[in-house]
Amino acid sequence: MKLLVALCLLLPLTAQEFTRQLWEPIRPIYARTLQHPFLTGLTDGTLPRESFEFYLMQDTLYLRSFAQALNILATRSPRKDWAQTLSRHAAGALQEERELHGRILASYGITPARIAASEKAPTTLAYTNHLLASVQLNSFTEGLAAMLPCYWIYLEVGRDLVRRGSKNKDYQRWIDQYSGDAYAATVREMLAIVDESARTASPQARRSAQRLFTLSARYEYLFWDMAWQREAWKP
């Protein structure tokens, strides 16, 4: 019994059978993600504002493609209620861009025109291309799996960071955004759709979903690394 309780405490959120299977192979990736200086810097104050600013600008560009990918998935959904949920999530991603990202960037003197004139860094472009290709070229379940790490890892990161907190008000606002109950409810909705959809997926589709989920988890790590280094195109 004690072993069972201990194992349950190690499981993130309220994953069911399939999503638990998805998470298991990325445990080392997630552990390394938590140790990245971008994330540790949010709480200990060592993250340069320039890196956080770069992250917010790139994430703004990312979220627009993320919302596009969700809307594509919505059109391919076998169930109307799932389509409505995915469309609502897409709208929420754009709202997040306008509210949290927009307010902080405006306080840094970054105008919407400057954001519009910016381009995706190499990692941002690669990650968004991966998501858009995944939702268009694969089954609905596989597309869901590719999208899931962005939801799930952000929540788990937020829950970890909120225990430490940050003296920087902007960093704390970011942490609060992804550790709150409202965001957790959104992630639970996505987990439920993935688990239910996987029940009728073929073994081949489930294996492909695992591969896409793991690849997206790697891109999540690379995205924070990109922001930390303020990645630029070369040449």
Image (tube, helix red, strand yellow):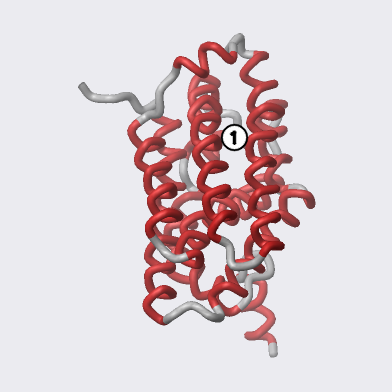
Quadrant placement of the N terminus? bottom right
For the image, the number of numbered tags is 1
Badge 1 element = helix
Taking depth in this image into account, of 201 and 17 the one nearest to the observer is 201
On screen, residue 213 above or below 117: below
Residue type at mark 1: give it. Leu
> Quick check: 133 left or right of 80?
left
Q: Which residue is mark 1?
A: 42
Residue found at x 69% / y 41% = 92
Task: Identify which residue is drawn at 41% across, 36% down.
Answer: 124
Depicted 31 relative to depicted 232: above or below = below
Q: Which residue shows up at 76% across the image and 48% down it?
A: 180
Picture coordinates of residue 231, whole percent (x, y): 36, 28
- Nearer to me, 133 or 23: 133
User: If the image is split into quadrants, where does the C terminus sit?
Assistant: top left
Question: Which of 162 and 113 lies nearest the eye of the viewer?
Answer: 113
Residue reaching furthest left?
235
- 13 or 63: nearer the eye? 63
**Image side of residue 8 versus residue 181, left or right:** left
Mark 1 burial class by Cα count in 10 Å: few <14, some 14-19, many 20+: many
In the rendered view, tell whether residue 168 sits above or below residue 93: above
Q: Residue 162 location in percent, x, y?
A: 70, 45
Give the percent coordinates (x, y) of residue 91.
Answer: 67, 40
